[in-house]
Amino acid sequence: MTQIQIAVVPVTLFQQNCSIVWDKDTRACMVVDPGGEPGRILDALRRLDLLPELIVLTHGHLDHAGGAKALKGEIDAARALRNLPPTPIVGPDKRDQFLLEDIEAQAAKYGMTGLRNCTPDRYLTQGEEITLGGLHFDVLHCPGHSPGSLVYIEKSQRVALVGDVVFKGSVGRTDFPYGDHDALIGAIESKLLPLGDDIGFICGHGEGSTFGAERLGNPFLQGRS
């Protein structure tokens, strides 16, 4: 039976949770939200003896996507040695394109170096599915933190990769000019919580949780279902 495996590699000064996700049986692997420090991510991949076939983005903020282009270059070089095709960058929703095109400018404001603008090979939309070996991730559009934020759900494994949509005890920031708190809460209420209390999630920063724990204890979601 397919089993999901996840290793979290915190990157950048924002300590963003870059996730290395793989199918235990087939060793098919993807990297989710390589926000920076590609060398650290590559070191983790080498220790795990994994060669990704996908790079996946939840949204366009610099700490989630700033290292994607450099990481892709390194992975593609390793894949070429094995006569394997390049690794595509997929996601987020195209509504985050303006953020991906502004990564370098935003990084300069924080004094961060090495982060690069990113153009995905393919944007994703709600209703699509990412297949990774025997794993199948449903794509859900959950705007509010950013217009194009996506969440990836592996229902059979009861696991979600939520980016900055929801956190343990909190939800994503919406105090950006493009933020929308009502849309964010609405997406969590209507698309995530109904999937089941037992679904555990990896979020973009800090410790993960379950939808059930957040439904009951998150001050932004208290008592919601």
Image (spheres, rainbow, N blue to C red):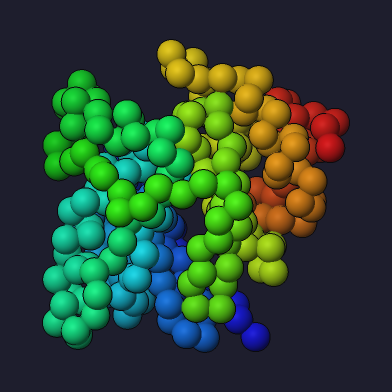
Q: x, y (%) of residue 161?
A: 55, 52
Q: In the image, 79: left or right of 141? A: left
Task: Give the left or right position of residue 87, taking residue 192 as reference.
Answer: left
Give the residue drawn at x 57%, y 47%.
Answer: 126
Q: Quadrant of the rendered structure where residue 48 is?
A: bottom left
With 6 as the anchor, is 107 left or right in this view? left
The quarter of the picture where residue 128 lies is bottom right
Q: Is residue 46 visible?
A: yes
> Can residue 16 be seen?
no
Pick the residue in front: 97 or 134: 97
The residue lying toward the viewer, choosing from 141 and 5, is: 141
Above-or-below relation of 1 to 72: below
Q: Quadrant of the C terminus?
A: top right
Q: Residue 211 at what x, y percent from top left?
A: 72, 46
Counting labels gives 0
On-image quarter of the N terminus: bottom right
Residue sitting at 47 percent across and 29 percent down? Answer: 146
Q: Quadrant of residue 58?
A: top left
Residue in view at x 32 percent, y 80 percent: 49
- Image coordinates for residue 124, horizontal then vertical, percent: 46, 49
Please state if 193 lies on the left or on the right of 180 as rendered: right
Task: Please provide percent x and percent y for residue 55.
Answer: 35, 59
Q: Residue at x 49, y 15 (%)?
A: 175
